[in-house]
Amino acid sequence: MGPCKSKSGVSETTKKSKFKFYRDYKGPEDLTNFDDFFEAGTKSQCKVCLTKEIWEEYKDQKCEQGVSFKMCVFSGVANQDSGIGIYAGSHDAYTKFNKLFDQVVSNYHKHGPDAKHVSDMTAEGLENAEFTPEQEAMVNSTRIRVGRNLAGYPLGPGVSKAQRLEIMNKVVEACNTFEGELKGKFYPLEGMSKEDQTKLIEDHFLFK
């Protein structure tokens, strides 16, 4: 979780695009005329799935966490080279704006609204789990990254800096209960000293 650089404390979901868009959109509230949103060559899921009917139904609505539908689609309109271009503002957005999100998820992940997600956190059944001695000798370090979101908080497009700090503190509090091999030290991105940066690199990437 990196520092929030937005002056308003809300994460930015846009980046500079190679397309030169012919309207100057500074924020989600600038999205008003659906017919002006997309250029002819745009192929994003936002363009494919966002029909005028869906836009008219959701354009003035917000999800449970207060993130507007316009914020969810803003990146895809502002960045015409997006592959997806849609960002859920909260867990609730997937059901609040389901006519759009269901179609995007179905197209991209091939996971329909009625499909079930099965979690298997065991190591059984993993393929290529056994390394030869020669392969093992080439590995200096490895890591597993798992991304999760906390209930009751918005997702990236709508989370404020204050909420990010709350989330960080809750995660740190939980991690501080770890013992044995799981015990460690949390390094926040903001305010990290050069000494902590060096130690982090040495501990986790084995650069000596």
Image (spheres, grey):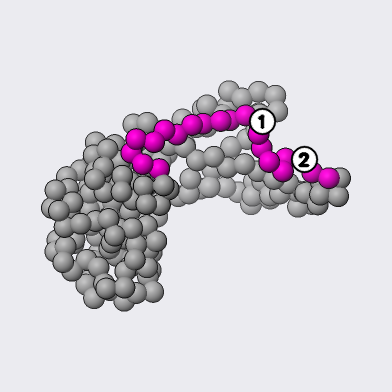
Image position of 87 with respect to 170: above or below: below
Task: Name the residue at 71% across, 49% down.
Answer: 205
Q: Position of residue 16 (x, y in %)?
A: 38, 68
Residue 151 image point, x, y percent: 37, 31
Tag of residue 175: none
Identify the residue under disc 2: 130
Residue occupying the point 54% across, 39% down: 146
Disc 1/disc 2 C-alpha distance (Å): 12 Å
Magenta stretch encompasses residue 128: yes
Viewer-nearest residue: 204 or 4: 204
Q: How many marks?
A: 2
Find numbered disc 2 in the image and state the secondary structure of the residue it sits on: loop
Residue located at (54% from left, 43% from top) = 188
Residue 110 in magenta? no
Residue 101 shown left or right of residue 118 in the figure: left
The part of the chain drawn in magenta is 111-132
- Judging from the image, what secondary structure is the residue with disc 1 in? loop
Q: Amino acid at mark 2?
A: Glu
> Chief secondary structure of the magenta span?
loop
Q: For the point 86% across and 45% down, which residue is it?
A: 133
Coordinates of residue 149 in the picture (x, y in percent): 43, 37
Where is mark 1, residue-wise? 124
